[in-house]
Image (cartoon, grey):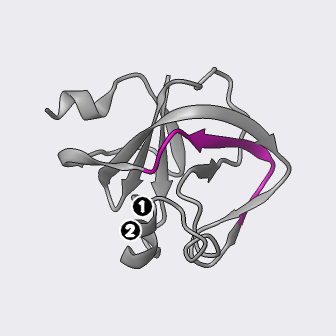
Amino acid sequence: MNLIRTIPQYETQKWLDLLFQPQTSETAKDCDPLTYPFPVQFREDVSGSYLYVRYRGDIIGYAKIADVQHHTGDTVGAEKKPVGLGDRVLLEAPLSPMPRPTPYLGGFRWKYEPDNLHEKTL
């Protein structure tokens, strides 16, 4: 089962761009492109599935999930907003852009997605 994580619309384009780049010591303080904390514990095993990132109504990128770890609180975004107790998704690589713009309605902060959306847009 895949996941969709919605990025709040107030995040800057500069911060979003970091999600598609390998982490360096220079960008580490601003963003870890391989780590996505969620405020819930998943009911389903999502390891080996895909994480899709949604921003302002469009799926903008995806990456394969390498592992899921429990966390007791984390921060996310340019302003380091708190994320409550839940699971943290670790990706194999930074996000890849979607092959073409992919509008996606529904879901507020996150949701399960049964389809491989990047394969449907080819």
The residues bearing labels 1 and 2 have C-alpha atoms spaced at a distance of 7 Å
Which amino acid type is shown beneath numbered disc 2? Asp
- Which residue is at a point 60% across and 50% down the rendered structure image? 36
Viewer-proximal residue, 107 or 46?
46
Viewer-proximal residue, 1 or 29?
29
Task: Label 2, secondary structure: give it.
Answer: helix
| Labels 1 & 2 near each other (Cβ < 8 A) | yes
- Which residue is at a point 63% across and 21% down the rendered structure image? 45
Q: Is residue 84 magenta?
A: yes
Residue 65 point in image, percent of width and height: 53, 34
Label 1 CA crowd tier, 10 Å (few <14, some 14–19, many 20+): some
State which mark lies toward you, 1 or 2: 1
Residue 3 point in image, percent of width and height: 49, 35
Task: Please tell me whether residue 68 is drawn above or below residue 95 in the rendered image.
Answer: above
- Which residue is at a point 25% across and 46% down the rendered structure image? 98
Label 2 CA crowd tier, 10 Å (few <14, some 14–19, many 20+): few
Q: Circle 1 is placed at which residue position?
A: 21
Q: Quadrant of the C terminus?
A: top left
Q: Circle 2 is placed at which residue position?
A: 17
The magenta segment: 82-94
Overall secondary structure of the magenta stretch? Answer: strand
Residue 43 point in image, percent of width and height: 68, 24
Residue 96 point in image, percent of width and height: 33, 47
Image check: 121 left or right of 22? left
Which amino acid type is shown beneath numbered disc 1? Gln
